[in-house]
Image (tube, rainbow, N blue to C red):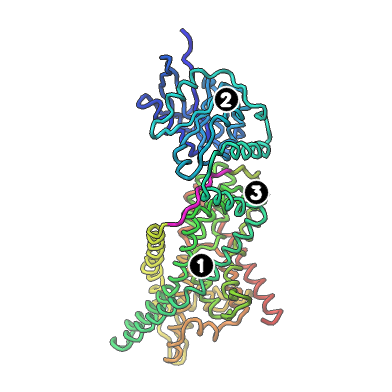
Amino acid sequence: MSRQRKVALVGNPNAGKSALFNALTGARQKIANYPGVTVERKSGRFVLPTGEPVEMTDLPGAYSLDATSPDEEVTSKVVRGHFPGEAVPDVLVIVLDASNLEQHLVFAQEILALGKPTVIALNMVDLAERDGLVLDATLLEQELGVRVVPTVAVRRRGLSDLAEAIASAEMGHPGPGITDLSLTERRVAAHAMAEGAILSETRRHRMHARLDRLLLNPWIGPFVLCALLFVVFQAVFAWATPFADGLEAGVGWLTDLTIKFMPAGLVRDLVTDGILAGVGSVVVFLPQIVILFAFILAMEASGYMARAAFLMDRLMSSVGLSGRSFIPLLSSFACAIPGIMATRSISDPKDRLTTILIAPLMTCSARLPVYAVIIAAFIPNRSVGWGVGLQGLVLFALYVAGVIGAMVVALVLRRSVTKGEASGFIMELPKYQLPRLKDMAIGLWQRAWIFLRRAGTIIFTVTVVLWLMLNFPQARPGESQVDASVAGKVANGLAFVVEPIGFNRDMALALIPAMAAREVAVSSLATTYAVDATDEDQQAMELGDQLKSRWTLPMALAFLAWFVFAPQCMSTIAVTRRETNGWKWPVFMLAYLFGLAYIAAGLTFWVASAIGL
């Protein structure tokens, strides 16, 4: 009895392989893992028009036969006949996404160059037509040298023609240009074939192609990305100011109301100097948070963020990482915790570890209140060019400093403790589309709620504890309350360590609760100065005015430099311990980040003082 023939579906991720596999095999499927690896193996029984039963396997999605992940390694070994215990496929069915033909043809050429019996399923032609793209399957057949069958798997269109093509597939004779080409040559050929196969396209489709040529250009693209980010940080200050002023006025009104209706005493002081001064000083930065995330959500929803990942791949590879690290690092701009968890998608263990270790250097949203209050207090609100504000320029520079610091650290790590080469990176580009206002509103509400919940829980708790530590024991007549308090004594001890880099006692005190949440540094300063106020005029002073009266510009710049590099909250350390299965790397992370923060703050203070700022 002859062996049952085997058919394998192969193609890029998101080509519709699984939908085609389900449509052809129906309920006659079984799922297991390939022996020795945790990669899913889906196989099923399929009957050809001749009545011959065949075994069909849905191979994992891949972008290249030069494997960079376990999934790609399985696919590469199976189609080449190198996987132990796995029969060599008799027929390969390459599944292409008709709406993203050029990208999918790159891998298709690599498969065709093997010379095996092959059929191509030009899948999702309905979505391509919906997007204004009509393709000529016959011309593709001539170029590729194998049968090309248009299909719509989810609607079972073209399945009978595909089954007939599989039954009659013979040893492949690919087109004259399909040989063992380099990746660059395959990309050039794929572009030419995709362009030649287009029968018609709408203006919208042509516009999207032109946008990609502009935004993905290796020279123009990075300039556009930097310009866009620059606009974002300008808007964080320019657009948020009226709303922040309104919230600040609201906090002041509540403070006055409390003083008016509550009797003098420790309870009133707790409400005014602790809760309202501390928590209120953080809440006023909600508009900046909302504006920042509005831009981030818009870039994600429009499809631009994935293109930014491609632009960053060249930079990432120069420091030993790949574009796969970009998405976790990008997530870390919101919060390092989901960013570190997102590194699970990185297959190379040393690449993943490096990404985890540098994720805290991405400027998370919790740092924004710290940056905003210092910049607003010490950097003049003036224009340095048409539409360019000095405050927004400084904020942009702080974010850039974090990114540059992360890249330098990654380069050092990849040459030492996490030594290794950068892995390849290919990612599907989503279609351009206008962001939906409803989705944007939901996303902004979620971000705002997370921020307010932190203000009402972590920041509230830490602020109350700090207020208690600042108020007990009570000072003797003529003695500063902060100097007499438990918190003051702790801060005086730490101040001895940070004094060489320009930090005073109040700055040292702010660093301790900031390990619970970065924003607490702001509430800590506000609470400290509220407790330390000796008269009503000082109590009425806003935090920015308090800082200007107590700090010098070099001190303020050193404080900003510290927060560019200092470790993030303890929750980040806990997640790092969980993701690395031990305390070795979290301790290493804390040590190098504190070291960088100390050096950066010191250099900033010494240089700024030397040049007379």
Span colored in magenta: 426-435
Assess disc 2: are there few (<14), some (14-19) or many (≥20) residues with their C-alpha within 10 Å of its C-alpha: many
As drawn, the residue found furthest toward the top would be 1
Along the line of sight, which residue is nearer the eye, 169 or 576? 169
Q: Is residue 551 above or below residue 99?
A: below
Q: Position of residue 163 (x, y in %)?
A: 45, 22
Asked whether the viewer can see residue 594, the reply is no
Instruction: Read off the residue under disc 2.
Output: 146
Q: Amino acid at mark 3?
A: Ser
Q: Which residue is mark 3?
A: 317
Q: Is residue 429 magenta?
A: yes
- Say what amino acid the circle numbered 1 marks: Arg
Q: How many marks can you see? A: 3
Secondary structure under tag 2 reads loop
Disc 2, disc 1: CB below 8 Å?
no
Q: Which residue occupies the foreground of this view, 452 or 5? A: 5
Callout 3 secondary element: helix
Query: In the rendered structure, are the residues bearing label 2 and label 3 in contact, judged by CB atoms less than 8 Å apart?
Result: no
Pointer 1 residue: 367
> Which secondary structure dominates the residues rendered in magenta?
loop
Disc with the residue nearer the chain's start (2 vs 3): 2
